[in-house]
Image (tube, rainbow, N blue to C red):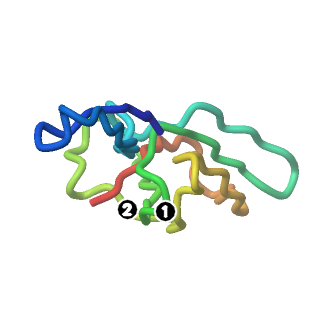
Amino acid sequence: MESYSYIPASAAPRAIRKKVSLAHPPAGSPMISMISYDSSNVTFSGSNGTPLITFRILASTNSATPAAVWIPIAINTFDASGDFSIKMPPDLTIPVMFYRVATT
């Protein structure tokens, strides 16, 4: 969060300072920054989300498939910093899978 001080035009002769705090969503799109795997879970971690907004992890066996037809495999909420981490069991019947994070 950024803070700025300003002097309202109506108060300029008295030089009263007001403080304004601005909160804004992060620039860019949410992204998966790490995928880790152990014998029982796949963990997706990422950042750059809008804090406390719902996101979905989408999957496809073909990365060229249009985003509209990727399958949602998990849903959760970004934390207060816009980050996320989610664990789920792997589907061992699918040899290759591509993933993306979406908010819409």
- Answer above or below: position of 6 versus 85: above
Instruction: Identify residue type, mark 2.
Output: Ile
Q: Is residue 9 left or right of residue 21?
A: left
- Percent of width and height locating residue 62: 35, 40
- Percent of width and height locating residue 46: 57, 40
Is the residue marked by circle 2 packed among few (<14), some (14-19), or many (20+) residues within 10 Å?
some
Residue occupying the point 39% across, 46% down:
23
Instruction: Say which residue label 2 marks.
Output: 71
Q: Is residue 22 left or right of residue 12?
A: right
Q: Is residue 101 left or right of residue 39?
A: left
Residue occupying the point 37% across, 32% down:
4
Residue 63 image-quadrant placement:
top left
Instruction: Identify residue type, mark 1.
Output: Leu
Q: How many marks?
A: 2
As drawn, the residue found furthest toward the left would be 10
Q: Which mark is residue 52?
A: 1
Is the residue marked by circle 1 packed among few (<14), some (14-19), or many (20+) residues within 10 Å?
some
As drawn, the residue found furthest toward the front would be 14
- Percent of width and height locating residue 41: 78, 55
Do labels 1 and 2 touch, CB within 8 Å? no
Residue occupying the point 71% across, 49% down:
43
Q: Quadrant of the C terminus?
A: bottom left
**Which residue is at the front of the view, 5 or 76?**
5
At numbered mark 2, what does the secondary structure look like: helix, strand or loop? strand
At numbered mark 1, what does the secondary structure look like: helix, strand or loop? loop
**Which residue is at the front of the view, 69 or 32?**
32
Residue 26 image-quadrant placement:
top left
